[in-house]
Image: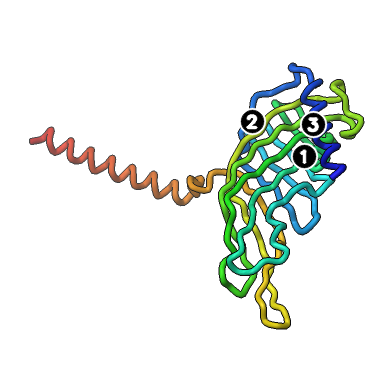
Amino acid sequence: MSRLLIGLCTLLLLATFTPSTARADTIVITSGSLTVAGFFQTATYSFAGQNFAMTGGGGDPGFVGPTGCFPCVSGASINANTFLVGSSLGQGTVTINGTTYNNLFIAGTFSFSGASVTVPNVMSAITLTTPFSFSGLINGCQVSHLLCTSSDVVFTTQLTGSGTAFIDLTFFQTASGLSLFQFQRVRYDFGDSTNPVPEPMSLLLLAGGLATLGGVKLKRMSRRMKD
């Protein structure tokens, strides 16, 4: 709890004293992912948007909603939300508008909001999926969060995005035969899963179909001109 309060205080100070010249427009994250692999584990992430890329790992676990499956039974509802603040974002490398900053301390917030998902009645390890929306506010600092002042902040920007959350659960049975599930990992993949990028073969088939339709139309036009 004390670390969370420190993170919130740090974020408030940075938001108050960071010069406006260091700010950038809101960046839409279009690719990459953030993963939390197990109970009390820190987040690791690598994602990108226009003129922006960020890779790093957290120092504190933060709040990871899916870990509420501890353990859970079939029919249980799992919270897909995750909230990371302050030192939970840890350190990393950020490239923004062509400039790369290495070994930065990242202060701010990551907020993943997804619908709750229900554990099905099965007897095996499972992966649950649900859409999520993402918002963030980050400050890149050259020194640790506790020592960071406005002069140490090299940039600050807001983030937004969406994608699909994948929640992995392990399965086990008790001696009495009770089936239980336990959180193993959650991964938030950025990108529009409803409109996937066409594969090369799909593009070739599409091009071939368009060429065929064009040829048919040309033949019909030539016949009309002859008639």
- Residue lying farthest to the bottom in this orientation: 176
Q: Find out whether the residues at labels 3 and 2 contact each other: C-beta distance under 8 Å.
A: no
Q: Nearer the viewer, mark 3 or mark 2?
A: 3
Q: Residue at x 72, y 57 (%)?
A: 67
7 lies above or below 82: above
Q: Residue at x 36, y 47 (%)?
A: 208
Q: Residues within 10 Å of mark 3 (few under 14, many from 20)?
A: many
Q: Nearer the viewer, mark 2 or mark 1?
A: 1
Q: Which percent across, then down, holds residue 4?
A: 82, 41
Q: Find out whether the residues at labels 3 and 1 contact each other: C-beta distance under 8 Å.
A: yes
Q: Between marks 3 and 1, how big is the CA–CA gap?
A: 8 Å
Q: Residues within 10 Å of mark 1 (few under 14, many from 20)?
A: many
Q: Is residue 167 left or right of residue 43?
A: left
Q: Secondary structure at mark 2?
A: strand
Q: Nearer the viewer, residue 165 or 66?
A: 66
Residue at numbered disc 2:
27
Which sits earlier in the primary sequence, circle 3 or circle 2? Answer: 3
Q: Is residue 196 left or right of residue 73?
A: left
Mark number, residue 11: 3
Q: Quadrant of residue 40?
A: bottom right
Residue at numbered disc 1:
85
Q: Which percent across, then down, holds residue 151?
A: 86, 21
Q: Nearer the viewer, residue 227 or 111?
A: 111
Residue type at numbered disc 2: Ile
Residue type at numbered disc 1: Val
Q: Nearer the viewer, residue 70 or 146?
A: 70
Q: Nearer the viewer, residue 157 or 102?
A: 157
Q: Which percent across, then down, holds residue 14?
A: 81, 26
Q: Between marks 3 and 2, how big is the CA–CA gap?
A: 19 Å
Q: Residues within 10 Å of mark 2 (few under 14, many from 20)?
A: some
Q: Find out whether the residues at labels 2 and 1 contact each other: C-beta distance under 8 Å.
A: no
